[in-house]
Image (cartoon, grey):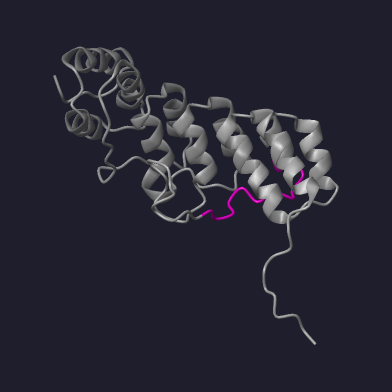
Amino acid sequence: MLSSDLRPAPPSPNDFAVVRAAQYGTADGAVALLLAGVSVEAGNKAARVAAECGRADTLRALLATGRVDPAAPMYLPPGLAPPGYPSKSEDVFLLWSAATNGYVDTLAALLEHGKLNPAGDDNHPLRSALRNGHPGCVQLLLDDPRVAPSAAMRVTCKVTPSTEAAWGVFYVHPRVASSLACDMMEHVGASEAAHTAAVAARHAAGLECAWL
């Protein structure tokens, strides 16, 4: 007779251990536990925790085993989701975690892996990097040919020195059209100093600038 209990089996001690190892950046220990046979969900959670904590080396080691799916969907009910959480169940959660926290090395590890779509959920990783003021992450994402900022992309954020620095990278990137840069600058409400600096930087780089 089949059991009617459909609850998943309780996590093993190794399941807890691999997540803890990822949290504290113990790459060799996390990989050893993963290869020892932890559950699929525990391996995926370890990758998520490594991304959230900026453990780039551990994340690379976990991804290299081939036993972690960085694109595994992770859904949280609206009441439990943190601010800025991706609205769609696309494969952007790990990228969003790295971009939101400014973990450039971790973001690079995820982009190198190749399986994730950095333009997913309407360029959510890029929007998060801009909103939270992380210039290095903005640069890294714009340098990826899969990311294509468009006029439909909108970002609401407080204008602070860090966000203006991040937007400064966006405004002068050669893959951002002059008209889009101008439109986004007005939308965010950048300061006059930031506007002047962006104009000068575009000219210095030999880029078109229609907003003098």
Q: How many marks?
A: 0
Is 157 in front, or is 3? 3
* Residue name at image x 73 percent, y 44 percent: 16
Is residue 97 rendered to the left or right of residue 30? left
Q: Is residue 49 visible?
A: yes
Q: Would you identify the image quadrant in which residue 22 lies?
A: top right
Q: Position of residue 128 (x, y in %)?
A: 39, 36
Q: Would you identify the image quadrant in which residue 188 lies?
A: top left
**Furthest residue toward bottom:** 1
What type of secondary structure mainly makes up the magenta span? Answer: loop
Q: Position of residue 89 (x, y in %)?
A: 47, 56
Q: Would you identify the image quadrant in which residue 187 lies?
A: top left
Above or below for 161 versus 8: above
Q: Is residue 143 visible?
A: no
Q: Is residue 191 magenta?
A: no
Q: Position of residue 149 (x, y in %)?
A: 34, 40
Is residue 115 rendered to the left or right of residue 36? left
Q: Position of residue 39 (x, y in %)?
A: 75, 55
Where are the magenta residues, as a range? 63-74
Is 25 in front, or is 66? 25
Q: Quadrant of the N terminus?
A: bottom right
Q: Quadrant of the C terminus?
A: top left
Is residue 178 rendered to the left or right of residue 66? left
* Residue name at image x 70 percent, y 80 percent: 4
